Amino acid sequence: MARGRLKPEFLERAESFSDRCVAVAEQLAADGRFLRIVEQLAAAGSSVGANLAEADEAMSTKDFRKCLAIATKELAETRFWLRLCIRRKWVPEGRLSSLLEELTEIKTIVGSILKGTQWESTKKPARSFTGRPIRETQSNARPAMESRRTSDLAI
């Protein structure tokens, strides 16, 4: 049973985006384009939907954020490959403009979700091995780093 952390409409949108990326990769393969780039585009584009589906069923907030962060990176990589295809004139820019717009919108949504969640570690105070909260005092505070001049550094 899904935990339902993400809206079903958003997951469907991400799946549709992944499908469209794979369709572009299939067309590039049929056109005889460089197979490595075709595979990279298909992998990155399909990974977006897969990671968002995984985030939807994450067991913890930390796992949820990790999946969203990976999806964000995969979106950036997908954008790179799509733009490369445009620069190489393998696909007309007009054909990929709506896909690139969708990518930007999904990335904005994922970024907003990430911003709205907090790392679990920031919610809890640091604890010592005894389980008591650690208080920052003069005795256990870290000393400040000494500044070094460039001439003092070994090259």
Image (cartoon, rainbow, N blue to C red):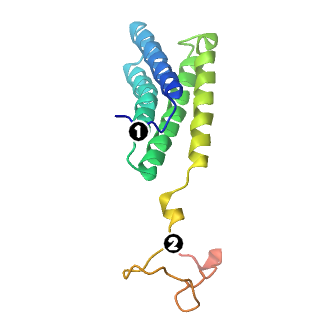
Q: Residue at x 45, y 34 (%)?
A: 52
Percent across and percent down for residue 101 are 63, 23
Q: Residue at x 65, y 78 (%)?
A: 149
How far apart are the alpha carbons under marks 2 and 1? 28 Å
Residue 142 vertical position relative to residue 107 in the rendered view, above or below: below
Percent across and percent down for residue 95 are 59, 10
Counting residues from the N terminus, which is met first, the one under dot 2 or under dot 1? 1
Q: Residue furthest top?
A: 31
Question: What's under tag 2, amino acid-wise?
Answer: Pro
**Foreground disc of the pair 2, 1:** 1
Q: Quadrant of residue 35?
A: top left
Question: What's under tag 1, amino acid-wise?
Answer: Arg
Percent across and percent down for residue 88 are 55, 18
Q: Quadrant of the N terminus?
A: top left
Horizontal relation, residue 27 to residue 100: left or right: left
Decide: marks 2, 1 in contact (CB < 8 A)?
Answer: no
User: Judging from the image, what secondary structure is the residue with disc 1 in?
Assistant: loop
Q: Residue at x 54, y 92 (%)?
A: 139
Q: Residues within 10 Å of mark 1 (few under 14, many from 20)?
A: few
Q: Residue at x 45, y 45 (%)?
A: 64
Q: Quadrant of residue 57?
A: top left
Q: Which residue is mark 2?
A: 125
User: Judging from the image, what secondary structure is the residue with disc 2 in?
Assistant: loop
**Camera-nearest residue between 52 and 21:** 52
Q: Which residue is mark 1?
A: 3
